[in-house]
Image (cartoon, rainbow, N blue to C red):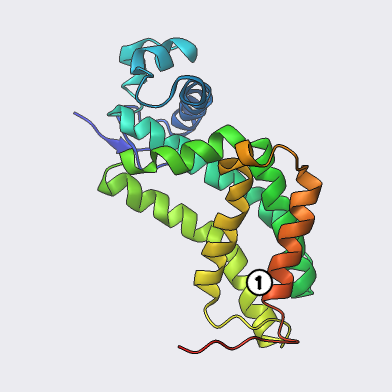
Amino acid sequence: MLKSRGRSDIETIVKDQDLIGRRHGQICDAALKLFSRKGYHQTTVREIAEACGLGIGTLYSYIKAKEDILYLVYRRILETFEGRMLRATQGIQDPRLQLKVALEETLKIYDECEDAVRLLYQESHTLGRQGLQGLFEVDRTYVGIFREILERGTRSGQFAAKDPYLLAVCILFLCAVWDLKRWNLQDYTLDTVIGSLTGLVLTGISADRPVEFPA
């Protein structure tokens, strides 16, 4: 007696797509706060329902399982990141400047969303195969922003990026160090980290003096 699929590929009883979107937003807001404070495994579905002002039966009209909530949270986080990245880099023609801005914005986002980033890295293994596949699709879109900049820079002769996709993934993981290793970077400011990492990446991929290593 289900089932229509919501905007985030979560099976729901409810058919109204606008209502599904609003309820999923409520669920995400409540869940992220609880997951960040208590951890995913220690947070119950009932607690999430209470936090977003829904009865537990009503909440299960919008999801099938607790895993669905984690997937919704991940998807929302990554789509928010993607939107901010696109706005920050829009209209910049020079690949080097665009990459610099993309790095700066990513680190600022990571700084503002420290709890969310940690959750992404710590709990993604909890998702089942279908949830992970959906998450990978969203993540690939975010990675694709960096990949496209790297490809343009390489075509224009500014960058020496032999594998833009791999490099894009590595750059994003490097940015995540600010959140994942914050406990070991207490003497550093965000501006210092931005300056160091953008300098490292832009110098490292510059086509002016490419470094060749034996295979």
Quarter of the rendering occupied by the N terminus: top left
Question: Which image quadrant is residue 8 in?
Answer: top left
Q: Give percent across and percent down for residue 41.
A: 34, 25
In this view, the residue in front, 185 or 81, is: 185
- Residue drawn at x 73%, y 71% as measured from the top left: 202
Left or right of 149 in this view: 36: left
Would you place residue 56 above or below residue 204 in this image?
A: above
- Residue drawn at x 51%, y 59% as measured from the top left: 141
Q: Give percent across and percent down for residue 172.
A: 58, 57
Decide if residue 159 is in sight here.
Answer: yes
Name the residue at the left extreme. 1
The residue to which callout 1 is attached is 149
- Residue drawn at x 78%, y 42% as measured from the top left: 189
| Secondary structure of the residue carrying numbered label 1 | helix
Would you place residue 55 above or below residue 180 in this image?
A: above
Decide if residue 53 is in sight here.
Answer: no
In this view, the residue in front, 29 or 121, is: 121
- Residue drawn at x 79%, y 50% as measured from the top left: 192
- Number of numbered discs overlaid on the protein picture: 1
Identity, as a three-letter code, of the amino acid under mark 1: Ile
Question: Which image quadrant is residue 143 in?
Answer: bottom right
Q: Give percent across and percent down for residue 70.
A: 40, 34
